[in-house]
Amino acid sequence: MPSKSSSQPSYNLSELLAVDYDLVMTLWNSAPGVRASEPRAEFARILLRNPGLSTVARVGNELAGAVLCCHDGRRGYLYHLAVAEKFRRQGIARALVDRSLSGLQKVGISRCTIFLVADNAQGKTFWQELGWFERTDLIAFAKDL
Ligand SMILES: CC(C)(COP(=O)(O)OP(=O)(O)OC[C@H]1O[C@@H](n2cnc3c(N)ncnc32)[C@H](O)[C@@H]1OP(=O)(O)O)[C@@H](O)C(=O)NCCC(=O)NCCS
């Protein structure tokens, strides 16, 4: 994958796998604005039900970024997008999102949604810059089972 400038190391994208659990949880939970709380078995179940959709970026052997991606047959969802601080502003998040969205398109999903922690201004700018629109017509409700 080309990098923006020759001084920046290139990154590789691949499928996020169950064995990446510890590394990605550490990355996600070190990123303000990301709330990743899936137990290991739930994480593995999401990946099993959504083969190939979630994406990880590595620079050499180092984890640089990751996103969890799934769908319910109608809509797609991206969760926990984060890039390690030292690898930011090199297009890695954009590439993670693009790979996962292509996967959703290939299985016939025509819209993807993300949930953003309300005070994550940096995250909001990112999604807006990528052309995502804010759903001001909806309010999310939840119920614990
Ligand atoms: C948001 C985040 C994922 C962006 O990762 P990244 O790899 O640096 O993003 P990219 O390099 O792909 O940026 C793509 C575009 O988004 C915009 N953008 C990204 N970070 C930005 C920032 N901090 N401020 C303003 N614009 C930003 C820019 O337009 C950028 O393009 P440019 O570099 O050509 O100007 C990263 O900052 C991060 O992990 N933040 C903490 C976790 C988080 O907030 N996640 C999103 C919530 S779901």
Image (tube, grey):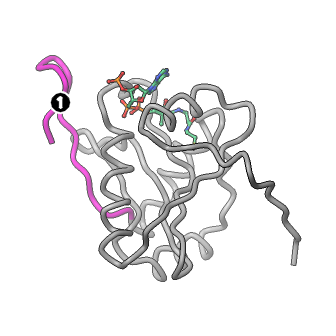
Residue nearer the viewer, 101 or 24: 101
Give the secondary structure at mark 1.
Answer: loop
Please name the residue shown 44% across and 31% down the image.
Answer: 129
Residue 78 left/right relative to 135 = left
Amino acid at pointer 1: Ser
Q: Position of residue 102 (x, y in %)?
A: 30, 62
Please name the residue shown 38% across and 69% down the image.
Answer: 104
All told, the count of numbered labels is 1
- Quadrant assignment, res 18: bottom left
Q: In this picture, which residue range is highlighted in magenta?
A: 1-16
Does 131 appear above or below 101? above
Please name the residue shown 20% across and 22% down the image.
Answer: 8
Please name the residue shown 43% across and 73% down the image.
Answer: 109
Q: Quadrant of ligand 1?
A: top left
Which residue in the rendered view is the most extreme toward the front? 137
Task: State the predominant SS element of the stretch in magenta.
Answer: loop
Q: Position of residue 82 (x, y in %)?
A: 49, 41
Does 70 appear above or below 25? below
Q: Crowdedness of circle 1 by 10 Å Cα count: few (<14), some, many (20+)?
A: few
Residue 21, magenta (yes or no): no
Does 88 appear above or below 116? above
Residue 91 left/right relative to 18 = left
Q: Position of residue 136 (x, y in %)?
A: 72, 45
Residue nearer the viewer, 118 or 52: 118
Q: Which quadrant would the C terminus be assigned to in this image?
A: bottom right
- Disc 1 designates what residue? 3
